Amino acid sequence: MAGIDYSQKIPNNVDLKSDRRLQRALESWQPDYIDWWKSMGPTDFNEKDIYLRTAVSVDREGWAHFDYVAMPDYRWGIFLTPQEADRKIGFGDHYGEDAWEQVPGEHRNALRRLIVTQADTEPASVEQQRLLGHTAPSLYDLRNLFQVNVEEGRHLWAMVYVLQAHFGRDGREEADELLERRSGNADHPRILGTFNEPCEDWLSFFCFTMFTDRDGKFQLLALAESAFTPLARTCRFMLTEEAHHLFVGQTGVGRVIQRTCQVMNEFPDADVTEHGAIPLDLIQRYINFWVSSSNDLYGGEVSTNASNFFRSGLKGRAYEEKREEHTAIEGHYNMDIFESGVFTNTDVPLRNAMNEVLRDDYIADNEKGIVYWNKITAKHNIDFQFALPHRRFNRRVGMYAGSPFSLTGDLISQVDWNAKAENEWLPTIADREYVQTLMKPSLEAGKYAGWIAPPAKGLNGKEIDFEYVKL
Amino acid sequence: MSTATLPALTFQTSPSAYRHWSLTVDGDIARLSMNVDGAGGLFEHYELKLNSYDLGVDIELNDAIERITFEHPAVRCVVLTSDAEKVFCAGANINMLNTSSHAWKVNFCKYTNETRLYIEDASLNSNKRFLAALNGTASGGGYELALACDEILLVDDRNSAVSFPELPLLGVLPGTGGLTRIVDKRLIRRDLCDAFSAVAEGIKGKRAVDWNLVDAVSPLSKWDETVATMSRRMADELPDRGDVKGIQMKTISRTETESGFAWKYVTLDLGPEERVAHLTLSLPSEVGVTDPAAIEALGCEWWIFRMFRELNLALLELRVLQPETGLVMTRVVGDINVALGIDEVLENSTNNWFLHEVSHFLKRMLKRYENTAKSFYAVIDEGTAFAGTFFELALAGDRQYLLCDPDVPVQIGLSNANSGRSPMANGLTRLETRFLGNPEKVGEALAHRGAIDSELANELCLVTFAPDDIDWEDELRIAIEERASFSPDGLTGMESNLRFAGPETMETKIFGRLSAWQNWIFQRPNAVGVRGALKCYGTPQAPEFDYTRT
């Protein structure tokens, strides 16, 4: 069961060949996907051999198989974690009942919307990152970028499989539209705002994989709890791949910090920009931007949809099994509701606060990254502390949207906001221009651009000067 | 809901005071854009998210439509759109519906329905076309608003849709004409309507066009251009009214009397009998200016126009703020020649835009009168002048009491106003509807244009009861007391059945069929019981239905 059938046009562990209808649907979607990849993926590197990991089985040992492969030949396929016998619903009104192998009619539309919203983020990030290959700081980083890209592509496959297998004609149309929307396109943008933000430099890429992909992790954790087993199983497997993306982000930003610290120590009286490093306060501004934008992805603080999704068993909480009570019908979430400029302390029914519950987990996880980075500055005896911006800062979604909150979450005047936000708190035009000047390719094995430190060790036991991409 | 919590509800506003809309006019194209102030609801316990609306938002919309008609007569196309990002309008606010009394909900829906119909009336009669430019999702009442427009353009961003989520999400109906308009106005196949009404997220893009839910879609990059081209084309399809200047619509003030309210021409007296109101329209002593240019110069002070605007405010006061009033005794007092004279002025000036618009305004107010859930008796006694347009008011009510005594001179009067100028919602005149069983009586009555003595009026079957001076007071007392003793719900149901005899139109279906069903559903435990869908919406609980079909 765990083995992947690579003899098929579409590698899979779901016995696709015995479902002719689904096989036909996916095979007709496949060429469109390849066309999309060729026009919107990292096109200019399609011919190159890249040291990528591919899943050969969904077992612990088999899912990370490394070898050189040209990206369009990457075996995108459909992998689900093994079927759990006698699976029960873990939360909501149907807690303890048998989980669903088929979509219940009453939840079909809501479930489809959830899946499409998640699925839409996968190709979006490939589009956002498609030109970064030209300015990679090393072969190691270039390879990581492409690994992230092909796996986001596979995540799209994973979601499309669920749509095509379980949502009929509507599902097939949605699958087509996933290839039609485009990140940042004025006419048919990606659904969520963050996935339309330009990601034009590597510092943005590292922040994106650190903070925005981490949203993906928590959304997948919540969907992996779903009463709808095919969705739960596919999300569960996606999580194994997502971990590497977060690693790329956290260590990527960390290596930029490390390099700046080294330059600061080497030239204590100089401006680090004179020596091609990225100032720590500039990095903090990038963090502020990507954290606030990613905070929006959880949706409104008080949400009827979130309540409905939880209640019906469509979307749970991360690590539901670790919680004591699973229906969440009686609990409350104490929240300062912000409305018309005033805070009111309110006990919100817990189900309606599920977005906030998930955001809490996300913020706690982000904090760990901040601690990791502050250890780097401390190790270099640099007196600089990174900090997460408050969840109220710079929001466009939810009750804080559009209101002037400082980095520490204090309500300030619009005048103060205007003065601070553009110059101190968020990346300035000068910041972006400076980072752009550093974006020069460094593509010789073992060479690393001057604004980033080499990694502590290579991938899959290889050295850091290994030829991760054959150019 | 206590009416005491509504001191600021006046039903009058002006663009400078709008909180939820903005109106700009550029030549013959007006842009009416929705951007609802979330904190600007009439009550504090709900927030108007995502361009959702309550009565206050609709009062502004109604004001804007009226102003476009009277202040900007040269406008030929009105673009209804939104300034909110990614959303056109999410319909009536759910929390508002959820927390409102049944009476409030019904009045709100009725007013909203009327405003939608005024848009369609302007399209039919006021040389205007309406373009719904949906720059984002239009759901529920938001899509119903779009359906009231002549054409619908939807943004094609692969995300924005039109939808009726009422059934799947709330267990109720789209209650402001939506279901009626998709089948009866846009003539969409009913099986497709059925499928559409069951998908909460709605239908977008090409399929929305294929199903005729919208007329066209446009990508964002061509949005402004498409809206401009469509609105230009729609405007050009209508005759150019040339260099007409509008009038200025001013706020009307009222004074509080000992037991009611007094405007310049209309008084509403809420005493002394319980639950009975006395509505009196007082004619001026003369017809006044008859020259259209001079009338236009008077603008909103022209007495017949002002009087019916006051009548409008009195009706809204009765409906919304005087819920316990059950019976309205209506009198029109003055010289019958003034009543007949003003009809002549209106009749002879159909090519003047202002008189034309006033005429349609009177028509709409007569319909609003008919659509008010109170019993109306016309009291035709000494000193009254129920003639022409004012006799329509008598016919619009439930009964006409005429004092018929040789010693007391009482007259009514008929004019062209009774032969088609103010059709009812069913498309017929009030006389035609009255005499459905004896159509020849319409002609018999209209043969007597001008003033008609009480005895002849009675013979022509133009009144219900015609007591003489001896019985008059007692008959009226008994009629009032009897009415006051009946179930108010039974009366509302009976009256709306009897008032709209004859053929059905989209309009009668909206009020008589859709609203009735909606109001029934709104009362049922499946919607508003402890575990009803409307009550559970937004809470952690799932609705629980009694699956018995009724």
Image (tube, grey):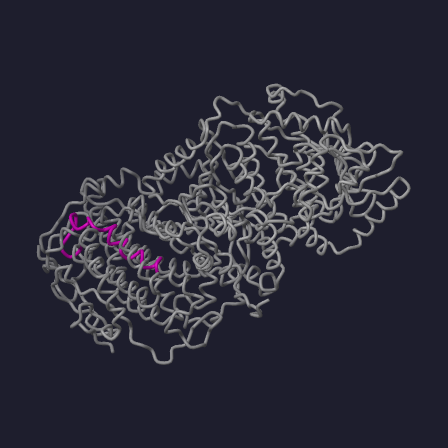
Q: Residue A278: within the magenta?
A: no
Is residue A309 visible in the rendered image? The answer is yes
Q: Residue A129: within the magenta?
A: yes
Judge from the rendering whether residue B169 lies leftward or rightward of residue A1; answer left or right: right
| Farthest residue, direction bottom | A85
Is residue A257 visible in the rendered image? The answer is no
Pick the front one: A91 or B95: B95
Judge from the rendering whether residue A46 lies leftward or rightward of residue B195; answer left or right: left
Q: Where is residue A415 in the image (x, y as percent from the top left)?
A: 44, 35
Pick the front one: B317 or A427: B317
Pick the front one: A281 or A196: A196
Q: Which residues, given as a range, are shown in magenta?
A: A116-141
Q: Where is residue B226 in the image (x, y as percent from the top left)?
A: 35, 38
| Farthest residue, direction right | B470
Q: Looking at the rendering, in which quadrant would you find the C terminus of chain A? A: bottom left
Pick the front one: B336 or A361: B336
Magenta span: chief secondary structure: helix
Quadrant in the picture for residue B364:
top right
The total of numbered circles placed on residues is: 0
Quadrant in the picture for residue A347:
bottom right
Q: Position of residue A92 (x, y in %)?
A: 47, 69
| Residue at 15 percent of width and 45 percent of height | A440
Judge from the rendering whether residue A46 lies leftward or rightward of residue B116; answer left or right: left
Q: In this view, does B238 lie above or below A292?
A: above
